[in-house]
Image (cartoon, rainbow, N blue to C red):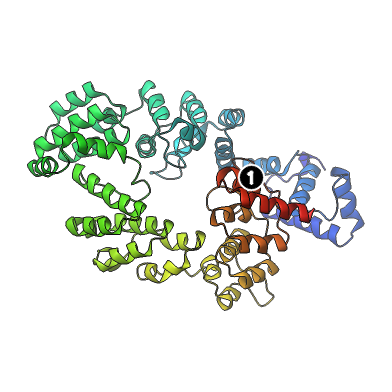
Amino acid sequence: MTTSKLPVRPSLESLRKQAKQLARGIAAGDPDAIGRAHAHLPKTKLPLSQRDAQLVLAREYGFPGWLDLLKEVKQRLGRGLEWAVPQARRSIHDNDLEGLRQLLADYPALLSWRADENDGGLLGMATDSYGDSFDPAREQQFSRAACAELLLNAGAVVAPSVCDNLLRDRARGLLDLFHRRGLLPESLKFLAARGDVTGVRACLDTNTDDLAAVGEAFICACRFQHEAAAALLLDGAIALDDELGRRIDEGPGRTAFVQYIIADSEITAFTHAEPAGCWQAFVMRQVVRAVNDGDLASFTCGLRREAWVLGEACVKFQAGLIERAVLRDRPTFIAALLDLDPALPRSPVPPPSQAVEFAFVYAKPHLLPMLLRIWPLPDDLPHTAGNGDLAGVKHWFDTAGKPALGQQVLDTALAWAVFNNHFEVADFLLAHGADINTNWSSHEPASILHELVWHRNYAAMQFLIDRGIDMTILDYRWGATAQGWALYAAKDEKMAQWLGEAQRQRS
């Protein structure tokens, strides 16, 4: 076939069905279907995977690949931008500058595209960091500065959320880039983040009565470790709040106060800490550090002394403390918090939280009874599987044993079942379509075996190995096997040797 054979208004669903029919025909031994496959993929072993069947179909229509066919279909249907957005996002993720440049040339509307009013568009994706990016090496790994610069050169629209996220992520390199381009607001918090003492002083002289803005700027200066700017802002805050000055002067002192917050500038990340001022920031850091250090006495004392942390205004922070306690496996801290009657369990609508998910993903099911006092167990397949409820799992399959959900949900359920050693549930899921070689991961694509390296769960790893998991799968970012993760990331030579021996025995 040629491109001209493609209908003027092609149906994407019809094309997918044609690929499925081709794959089924080859599996059934249909000579015409087999001939079509050999004509375009002469060296491919039969039967064809669905992906290869799509490739054959695309080539029959005169396109080099399935994505090229999809592009043409969506363009003909007036949905070219819908196709281009995920391609551009993929180019940014892969740091593929040439691919991104070509997409921007073909689809200029990408420069102003946003999923919603709070979304930063493609520029937001390029500048967003996977984690704290104060270290230049981490910023290079976690963000896509070259893609961001390309987008800016092409005229990308800069949404306010993009600049705010630079402060959230502590991305110094990107902050400098935006400053050079004149894209940063000249507000107090951005001057503080840049350590511009002259600008901060001038701004304080004209905005001496906005305590909230001064407190926010003080926190930004500390997070970016600009001590001089932070000290200046603290003096400005104390000039507006005598009680703040009394607490600090009777406690650590101003210099020590600034240095403490600067030293702990990263510690409250991912705890939903939104301090309303300097003192709140100080207290929140003390409480989170107590969780990290396993210091239950300081944790409890801090919460009792500063009762506002237990109030309705801090329910998100309370949820963040519980999430941190789950990750650190600190059940006594969760119990201590709940014993102090915080507002969180009494909230009519508790804030969204990953606490229950963390309990499954990081194999902490013993924490669930406390967590379920606040958040209900979601009624879905992954949570049911992670909970080891085989009867409940079976309800997600029809009478023919086919899953009523997508492959990603099925694979997530498999991962959670394996993480929590519910091997009977995992076997059921494997028998009903779960992919043991799925690239599901709690963060970026990798195998379940990669994830288990961090759990140091030999029983679960052996379960997967016994059932034939591909031990040569490489993770998306580093291109390493699970054995590589064990040796270089977890620095567990014993585990690396164990995985290597398992691979040799299989070979």
Relative to the observer, which residue lies in front, 312 or 246?
246
Indicate the position of residue 30 as horizontal and vertical percent values: 89, 59
Q: Residue at x 48, y 26 (%)?
A: 149
- The image shows residue 99, relative to residue 76, as above or below, that is above
Relative to the observer, which residue lies in front, 452 or 89?
452
- The image shows residue 485, relative to residue 313, as above or below, that is above
Relative to the observer, which residue lies in front, 232 or 98?
232
Using residue 353 as the reference point, say whether residue 110 is left or right of it: right
Using residue 461 as the reference point, say whether residue 321 is left or right of it: left
Secondary element at tag 1: helix
Q: Amino acid at mark 1?
A: Gly
Q: Residue at x 12, y 37 (%)?
A: 238
Whether residue 485 is visible, yes or no, is yes
Q: Looking at the rendering, which quadrant does residue 61 occupy?
A: top right
* Residue at the far front in the pictured view: 494
Whether residue 348 is visible, yes or no, is no
Indicate the position of residue 172 as horizontal and vertical percent values: 39, 30
Q: Residue at x 21, y 26 (%)?
A: 200
Residue bearing mark 1: 484
| Quadrant containing the N terminus in the rendered view | top right
Q: Looking at the rendering, which quadrant does residue 212 occupy?
A: top left
Using residue 101 as the reference point, say whether residue 227 is left or right of it: left
